[in-house]
Amino acid sequence: MSAKGRRNGLRPFETFEHTADIGLIVRGRTLRALYVNAAYGLVSLIVDPRGLREAIVERVTVSASDRETLLAAWLNEILYLLDARRFLPRRCRVRSLTETALEADLVGDAFDERRHTSRRVVKAATYHNLELTRINGGWEARVLLDV
């Protein structure tokens, strides 16, 4: 999965170390872009996304009480698809997004140890110190991932 690179000097995602966890800082010009970049960042932590084909389409609907918890639910839904169906997205498109719900199409591949380079096991997106804020005309989120 490739992030679109820098736009206006912003990196779509980066990581930071945290005790027994790893943090993900995600940016986007829009909330839709932020959620897409969060998916890209998560997948990039798990596997080298360049090895993923675009062979399977999954439609995902997630809901939560607010934007922050929606972000964690979104990432946890992607982790659920990996655990339940061995599916990882290479590309995603947010079809609709509100304060409390997200619907997206994920296009990707079934994880195969013989074809994919595994990087780390991510167990869950946590709610600890979860933040989603406006920055410089866009959005930034910080989320801790349990590894």
Image (cartoon, grey):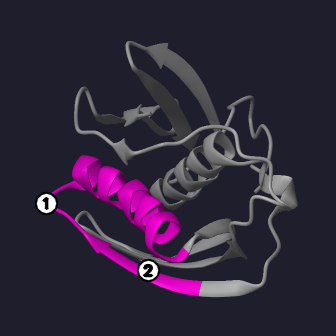
Quadrant location of the C terminus?
top left
Q: Is residue 145 above or below residue 111?
A: above
Residue 69 belongs to the span the image colors magenta: yes
Q: Which residue is mark 1?
A: 65
Position in image of residue 60 (x %, y %): 43, 80
Label whose residue precedes the other's in the sequence (1 or 2): 2
Position in image of residue 94 (x %, y %): 52, 73
Instruction: Say whether residue 6 is left or right of residue 143.
Output: right
**What amino acid is labelled 1 in the image?**
Ser
**Quadrant in the rendering for residue 106:** bottom right
Q: Residue at x 50, y 15 (%)?
A: 17
Instruction: Say whether residue 3 is left or right of residue 45.
Output: right
Q: Residue at x 32, y 50 (%)?
A: 72
Region of the chain picked out in magenta, as a range: 58-85
Position in image of residue 111 (x %, y %): 68, 66
Q: Is residue 49 above or below residue 13?
A: below
Q: Main secondary structure of the magenta part?
A: helix
**Quadrant in the rendering for residue 49:** bottom right
Q: Is residue 71 above or below residue 91?
A: above
> Residue 60 — which label?
2
Q: Residue at x 78, y 37 (%)?
A: 6
Category of crowding for the residue at label 2, using alpha-carbon neighbours closer than 10 angstroms: few (below 14), some (14–19), many (at least 20): some
